[in-house]
Amino acid sequence: MKKNFKIDVDCAACADKMEVAAQKTAGVKKATVNFMTLKMTVEFEDGADVKSVMQEVRKNCKKAEDDCEVFI
């Protein structure tokens, strides 16, 4: 399953940090961050609980770039 999420980030380098952090999160099959559209697309692993995975994605993104936001 794929879902899009609105994000808030200040620069392209920070968006790249968010993408790497999201991809390392358990339950995420693939994640891409588009700085120009301020959107994150996440493809979840089969059977993953989207809500709990996205809470972890948000935490991991904040660790990588504390001045960002993922709206879930």
Image (cartoon, rainbow, N blue to C red):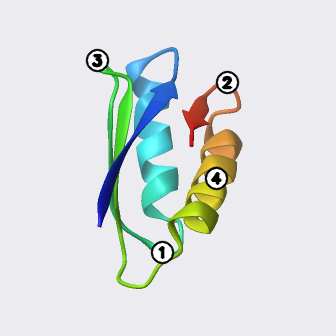
- Spatial separation of the CA atoms under disc 3 and disc 4: 21 Å
x 48%, y 74%: residue: 27
Proximity of marks 3 and 4: CB atoms separated by less than 8 Å: no
Mark 3: secondary structure: loop
x, y percentage for residue 14? 49, 28
x 68%, y 40%: residue: 62
- Name above or below for residue 54 compared with residue 13: below
Q: Earlier in the sequence, mark 2 or mark 4?
A: 4
x, y percentage for residue 15? 43, 31
Q: Earlier in the sequence, mark 3 or mark 1?
A: 1
- Spatial separation of the CA atoms under disc 3 and disc 2: 17 Å
How many other residues sit within 10 Å of disc 4, few (<14), some (14-19) or many (≥20)? many
Q: Which residue was labeled with disc 2?
A: 67
Q: Is residue 72 left or right of residue 33?
A: right
Q: Quadrant of the N terminus?
A: bottom left
Q: Which residue was labeled with disc 3?
A: 36
Mark 4: secondary structure: helix
Closer to us: mark 2 or mark 1?
A: 1
Q: Earlier in the sequence, mark 3 or mark 2?
A: 3
- Spatial separation of the CA atoms under disc 4 and disc 1: 13 Å
**Amino acid beneath label 3:** Met
- 6 and 60: which one is in front? 6
Proximity of marks 2 and 1: CB atoms separated by less than 8 Å: no
Q: Splitting the image into 4 quarters, where does residue 70 fall?
A: top right
- Name above or below for residue 55 compared with residue 69: below
Q: Is residue 56 left or right of residue 36?
A: right
Q: Which residue was labeled with disc 4?
A: 60
Mark 1: secondary structure: loop
Q: Earlier in the sequence, mark 2 or mark 1?
A: 1
Q: Is residue 38 left or right of residue 72?
A: left
- Number of numbered tags placed on the structure image: 4
Q: Which residue was labeled with disc 1?
A: 27
